[in-house]
Image (cartoon, rainbow, N blue to C red):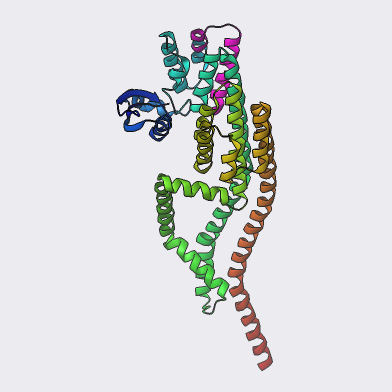
C-alpha cells in the first residue's frame, strides 16, 4: 500500500504533519476528514513511488495461484515452528517466479531488520493488495499468523476457481465467434469476388437484392475495412479515457450492473466477492471499519464500493450495516436479512460465508445455463450467415440457367 505525507489542521486550527498508508489519496483524505481534520496537503512519498521494483521486475506477472501456493506453504512452515525469516528463505528458494523471488528476498531483509511483515508487504501494493496486507497484519497482532495465511490461501483459491469458471464458460462461445467471423470474412474477401468476376464475364447485369448487398459488403471489406479498424481503435481509446474519469467509471460500472443477462451475473460475482472478503477479514480479527474499507477497494465495482463506504460511514456513527445497504438497492433482501441476523447473533462472519457460498453456486448455475444457451445461438447464426452468402452467389447463376433453358425452348419451338 502506498505511503502518503499529509498536513492537516485540527479543530483548534493547529497544523499537524504525519505519514500514513492508504489505497490512494482520496481514501486517506476521507479517513482524515472522518477524524475531524481539515486537509491542507497530501502527497505520495518518494519511497512509496520507488517501492514497486525495477522496470524489468514489473514485466513479469505474479499469478494469484502462485500467491495462494506461497501462503499455504508459508502457513505450514509457521505452524511447524519454523522461524519467519527461515520460512521466507525457503519460499524464495523454491519459487519459480523471478519477480516474486526478488520480492521475498527483500521482505526477508525487512523482517530481519525488525520491520513487521505486513508493513514490508505494503511496499508492493500491486502484488499484495489491501486484503493481503490486512490479513497478515491481523495475524501478526493476534499472534495467529499461520491461521491468517491459511485463510488467505483458501480465499485466493476460491477467487481463482470463480475466475476460472467464468473464463471456461466464455471460452467456447468466444472460439465460435472468432471462427464464424473468420469464415464470413474469408468467404466475402476470397470467394465472393471470384463469383462477381464470373457474373461480369457472363454479362449478368440484373442482380437480386441479396446479391447486391453481398457484393457491396465484399467491396467494403476489400477496400474500406481500414475505416472499421480505425473506428474500433478510436472507440476503444475513447472508452479507456472515459472510464479513467470518476464520472465515467461510475457510469460504466452502473451499466455493467444493468446489462441484460450479464448484469445479474456481474452483480452475483460482486456479491460473492463482497461476502467472501468481508467474512474472511472479520473471522481473522480485522476491525469492521478497516474490513469494509478493504472490501470497498476489492469488490471491482465502484458503484458497490460507494455503497459499502456509505455503510462504513454509517457504522462509524453507530448505525447497523444493513440499513445503508438497503438504500443502495444493489444488495438483495436475502443478503440484507442474513447480515442483520448475523449482526444480532454475533455470527456475522458465518453468515457472510453462507452468502458467499450461495452466490458462488448461483454464478456457477448461471454460467452453465448461459453457455448452454449461447452455443446453439452462435451455431445457428453461423449457419444462417453461410446460407445467405451461398444463396446470394447462386441466385444469379440460377437466373442465367433459367434464361438459357428458356432460350433453348424457344429455339426448339421455332424449328
**For residue 58, above or below residue 118:** below
Q: Residue at x 40, y 51 (%)?
A: 238
Check the image and name the residue furthest to the bottom. Answer: 414
Q: Residue at x 60, y 43 (%)?
A: 326
> Where residue 408 sits: x, y (%)?
65, 85
Q: Does the magenta run of residues contain 78?
A: yes
- Helix, strand or loop for the magenta stretch, by majority: helix
Instruction: Find residue 36 and report its image quarter.
Output: top left
Q: Is 155 positioned to the left or the right of 39 in the image?
A: right
Which quarter shows the C terminus? bottom right
Residue 275 seen in this snapshot = yes
The magenta segment is 64-88
Instruction: Find residue 126 and report its image quarter.
Output: top left
> Where residue 203 sits: x, y (%)?
51, 78
> Where residue 393 sits: x, y (%)?
58, 69
Toward the viewer: 45 or 141?
141
Q: Residue at x 47, y 21 (%)?
A: 100
Q: Does the magenta run of residues contain 342?
A: no
Toward the viewer: 322 or 286?
322
Residue 353 seen in this snapshot = no
Amino acid at each position: 500500500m502506498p505511503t502518503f505525507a499529509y498536513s492537516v489542521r485540527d479543530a483548534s486550527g493547529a497544523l499537524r504533519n504525519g505519514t500514513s498508508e492508504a489505497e490512494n489519496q482520496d481514501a486517506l483524505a476521507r479517513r482524515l476528514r472522518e477524524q475531524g481534520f481539515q486537509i491542507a496537503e497530501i502527497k505520495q512519498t518518494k519511497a512509496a513511488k520507488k517501492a514497486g521494483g525495477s522496470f524489468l521486475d514489473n514485466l513479469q506477472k505474479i499469478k494469484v495461484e502462485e500467491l495462494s501456493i506461497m501462503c499455504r506453504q508459508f502457513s505450514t512452515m509457521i505452524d511447524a515452528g519454523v522461524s519467519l525469516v527461515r520460512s521466507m528463505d525457503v519460499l524464495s528458494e523454491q519459487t519459480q517466479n523471478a519477480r516474486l523471488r526478488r520480492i521475498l528476498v527483500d521482505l526477508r531483509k525487512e523482517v530481519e531488520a525488525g520491520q513487521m511483515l505486513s508493513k514490508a508487504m505494503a511496499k508492493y501494493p500491486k502484488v499484495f493488495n489491501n486484503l493481503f496486507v490486512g490479513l497478515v497484519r491481523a495475524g501478526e497482532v493476534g499472534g495467529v499468523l499461520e491461521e491468517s495465511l491459511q485463510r488467505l490461501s483458501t480465499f485466493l483459491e476460491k477467487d481463482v476457481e470463480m475466475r476460472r469458471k467464468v473464463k471456461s464458460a466464455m471460452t467456447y462461445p468466444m472460439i465460435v465467434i472468432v471462427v464464424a467471423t473468420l469464415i464470413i470474412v474469408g468467404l466475402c474477401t476470397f470467394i465472393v469476388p471470384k463469383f462477381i468476376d464470373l457474373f461480369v464475364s457472363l454479362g449478368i447485369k440484373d442482380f437480386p437484392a441479396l446479391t447486391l448487398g453481398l457484393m457491396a459488403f465484399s467491396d467494403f471489406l476489400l477496400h474500406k475495412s481500414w475505416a472499421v479498424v480505425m473506428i474500433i481503435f478510436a472507440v476503444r481509446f475513447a472508452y479507456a479515457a472515459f472510464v479513467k474519469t470518476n464520472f465515467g467509471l461510475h457510469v460504466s460500472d452502473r451499466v455493467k450492473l444493468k446489462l441484460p443477462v450479464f448484469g445479474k451475473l456481474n452483480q452475483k460475482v460482486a456479491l460473492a466477492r463482497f461476502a467472501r472478503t468481508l467474512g474472511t477479514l472479520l473471522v481473522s480479527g480485522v476491525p469492521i471499519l478497516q474490513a469494509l474499507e478493504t472490501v470497498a477497494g476489492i469488490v471491482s465495482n465502484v458503484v458497490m464500493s460507494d455503497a459499502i463506504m456509505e455503510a462504513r460511514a454509517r457504522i462509524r456513527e453507530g448505525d447497523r450495516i444493513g440499513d445503508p445497504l438497503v438504500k443502495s438497492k444493489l444488495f438483495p433482501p436475502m443478503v440484507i436479512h442474513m447480515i442483520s441476523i448475523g449482526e444480532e447473533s454475533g455470527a456475522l462472519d458465518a453468515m457472510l460465508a453462507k452468502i458467499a457460498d450461495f452466490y458462488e453456486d448461483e454464478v456457477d448455475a448461471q454460467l452453465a445455463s448461459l453457455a448452454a444457451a449461447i452455443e446453439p445461438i452462435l451455431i445457428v447464426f453461423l449457419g444462417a450467415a453461410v446460407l445467405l452468402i451461398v444463396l446470394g452467389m447462386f441466385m444469379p447463376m440460377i437466373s442465367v440457367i433459367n434464361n438459357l433453358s428458356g432460350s433453348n425452348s424457344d429455339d426448339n419451338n421455332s424449328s
